[in-house]
Amino acid sequence: MKLTPEDFFRIISLSRHRVLFEECVFVWEVLKHLREYLLEHLKPLPSGIPLREPLLQGMVICEGECVPLSEVEMVKEDRSFSLYHKGEVLQGAVVMAGAVLMDREIELSPGVVVEPGALLYGPAVIGPGTEVRQGAYIRGEVLAGEGCVIGHTTEVKRAVFLDGAKAGHFAYVGDSILGREVNLGAGTKLANLKLTRGHVKIQWQGEVYDTGLRKLGAVLGDGVQTGCNSVTNPGTLVGPGSLILPNVTAGPGVIPPRSIVRK
């Protein structure tokens, strides 16, 4: 492993956001470029959505327009749903009453659901079919791909969720990258700030790499799973297919692919 994005993620499978990864030598550099990338590429919220207060009524955001949710029929289909307005299908995002959108630098793709009590700061791009569940706190600089879950009372800040990544319950995801189909068990915390001062450094194969980052949480490769109440130390890089068992504190440093972390 050379600690490149390709060591942790199937970059070839990325589409819209592939360029963010291809320009990085080391995987943690993705976080350095994230804010600039989001501001350059996102499609902001339409002017019809109230900001900085709980929505009094639900809305569907579709092609830059807002339609009251009360005028839309929402039909569930397995794990997805369809929206109908005046007999026509809508390809939009649902923002339920009680959600709070703090600024317009937020892109909500078709199929997104933002539940009551969720609070979102930009810049953020929330990809198709992603769930932002009740009480979620998105603090900005967040990129979520397709079919992700940012779950109940989960706090996310300066983070990337690749397609299918899920932090369903009571998680903290700070300055971190979650690969495809990563799943965080309830109560998982990806700690991002050392108790001592200075940059987070990564030791690997006799070398010490200064990330240049004061805050760096975890990089979880494709398919990584964490058990309930597990914690990763700042600067923990977990190879694809690995398991972190419940109540374990992992890292810091590099965990090879397909490892089982027991203590």
Image (cartoon, rainbow, N blue to C red):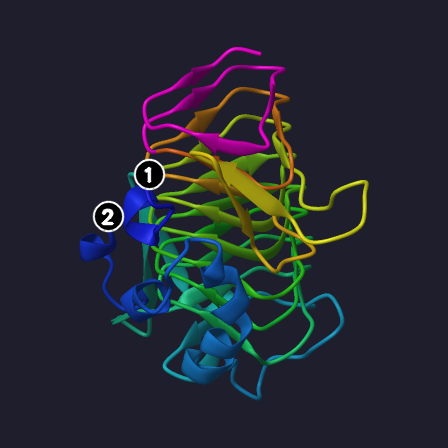
Mark 2 residue crowding within 10 angstroms, few (<14) / some (14–19) / many (20+): some
Contact? badges 1 and 2 (CB < 8 Å): yes
Residue designated by label 1? 222
Q: Is residue 90 above or below residue 184?
A: below
Q: Is residue 110 above or below residue 240?
A: below
Q: Inspect the magenta stretch and tell me whether residue 254 lies in it.
A: yes
Quarter placement of the C terminus: top right
| Residue 254 percent location from the top left of the image | 47, 33
Q: Is residue 216 above or below residue 105?
A: above
Determine which of the numbered discs, if any, sits on residue 153 in the image. Answer: none
Residue 68 visible to the viewer: no
Q: The disc labelled 1 sits on which kind of residue? A: Asp
Q: Secondary structure at mark 2?
A: loop
Q: Secondary structure at mark 1?
A: loop
Specify start and end residues of the magenta stretch as a single range: 240-263
Q: Is residue 217 left or right of residue 40?
A: right
Q: Residue at x 29, y 65 (%)?
A: 22
The single residue placed furthest to the front in the displayed view is: 206
Residue designated by label 2? 10
| Front-lying residue, 121 or 262 | 262
